[in-house]
Image: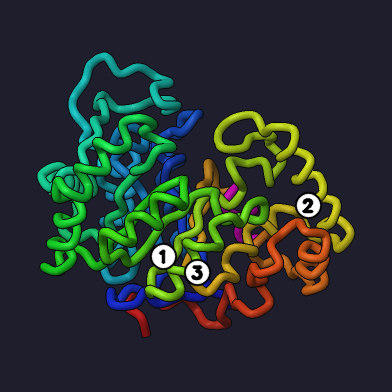
Amino acid sequence: MKAFATHALPRSGLAMTTLGLGCSQLGGLYKPMSTAEANALLEWAWDAGIRYFDTAPFYGYTLSERRVGQSLQMRERERYVLSTKVGRLMRPDDTVQPGDDNWAQPLPFRPRFDYTFDGIMRSYEDSQQRLGMQTIDILYVHDIGAATHGDAHSRYWEQLTRGGGFRALAELRDSHAISAIGLGVNEWQVAVDSMQEADLDLVMLAGRYTLLEQEALSPLLDQCVSNGVRIVAGGVFNSGVLVGNGKFNYADAPPEVARKVARLADACAKFEVPLAAAALQFPLAHPAVVSCVVGARSIEQLQKNIAWLETPVPPELWQALQHEGLIAGSAPVPEARSFFTTDQPSGDRQAQ
């Protein structure tokens, strides 16, 4: 039986499955998800061999963390890798309404950015309680950068660097309270800056290293390879434009993006490969990438993702995409990377 390959994370002792489950949808992103649907999705993901789960306090205003924790509490702790995020403190607020920050049924807590030493420590402790777990494997700094904060970025960057945020993460890792630290961001530039300030293990990079765009190849991914920092690829469908929903970066795709997507789709069609399959497999070829995290609103969606990962893609397709200038000529392509093993998943989060 096929099982997801695992990839070791240097220094931490963690091993991450090729495919991870991103749990923003469990917080009701855009559309509500019932508790029964959330539990069924997490159960099916486990049975399918997924052993990496990523959540955040922001998702559903704490709803996702609560659901993930409730589901995983029944599992042996050593059998999976769990990440959550810091940088927002969730405070009780009875003015929260459905639709706030695109959460369909958010819980009555309002996020407040805080990247200070005390803010990071408090966020970590709050997440432990919501998850119902003593240990969290990975903490990502969530949404630091100008893309989120605009003109306020310098103030939050000061909190993270001079105000002790990175120091808090280092202390948690050094004390073995957590195993690894990183960023969870939508822009590659702030990851490069952060690597000059902190000894990161990981960068969860959403939407910036995909079949559609590879600007992050240099300097970020080059530096990651040199420094032993690993990438978790998120947003590999660029908000859905690569699976046909017309959205790019959470908005309607501009004409130039739509044109490139059409060219990518035409090239894939010539080799009878679904565009989504090429999009999911492409980032996993890079030696810095240890896992690809996908979100799913239903079991059916997750099944589709796994089917796309299993879809054979001939080397000639990647060659054609590079020849036509649709992907960077320097980008590694997937023939050198195995996504599955022939063994049953051990589920052991420790590297073998």
**Magenta highlight range:** 301-307
Q: Where is residue 2 in the image (x, y as percent from the top left)?
A: 58, 75
Q: Which of marks 1 and 3 is in front?
A: 3
Q: Nearer the viewer, mark 2 or mark 1?
A: 2
Q: In which quarter of the image is the N terminus?
A: bottom right
**In this rendering, position of residue 65 left or right of residue 286:** left
- Please name the residue that numbered disc 1 is placed on: 51
Which colour assignment does the render follow?
A: rainbow
Q: Residue 351 falls in which quadrant of the image?
A: bottom left
**In this rendering, position of residue 27 left or right of residue 295:** left
Residue 329 in magenta stretch:
no
Q: Residue 222 carries which label?
A: 3
What secondary structure do most residues of the magenta stretch adopt? helix
The residue sitting at 71% across, 60% down in the picture is 327
Find numbered disc 2 in the image and state the secondary structure of the residue it sits on. Answer: helix
Outermost residue toward the top in this view = 95
Find numbered disc 3 in the image and state the secondary structure of the residue it sits on. Answer: helix
Q: Position of residue 294 (x, y in %)?
A: 52, 52
**In this rendering, position of residue 118 left or right of residue 288:** left
- Please name the residue that numbered disc 2 is placed on: 264
Q: Where is residue 144 in the image (x, y as percent from the top left)?
A: 34, 43
Q: Distance between the residues labelled 2 and 1?
A: 31 Å
Label 3 crowd bin: few (<14), some (14–19), many (20+), radius 10 Å: some
**In this rendering, position of residue 239 left or right of residue 104:** right
Q: Which of marks 2 and 3 is in front?
A: 3
Q: Which mark sits nearer the N-terminus, 2 or 1?
A: 1
**Hey, what amino acid is under mark 3?**
Asp
Label 2 crowd bin: few (<14), some (14–19), many (20+), radius 10 Å: many
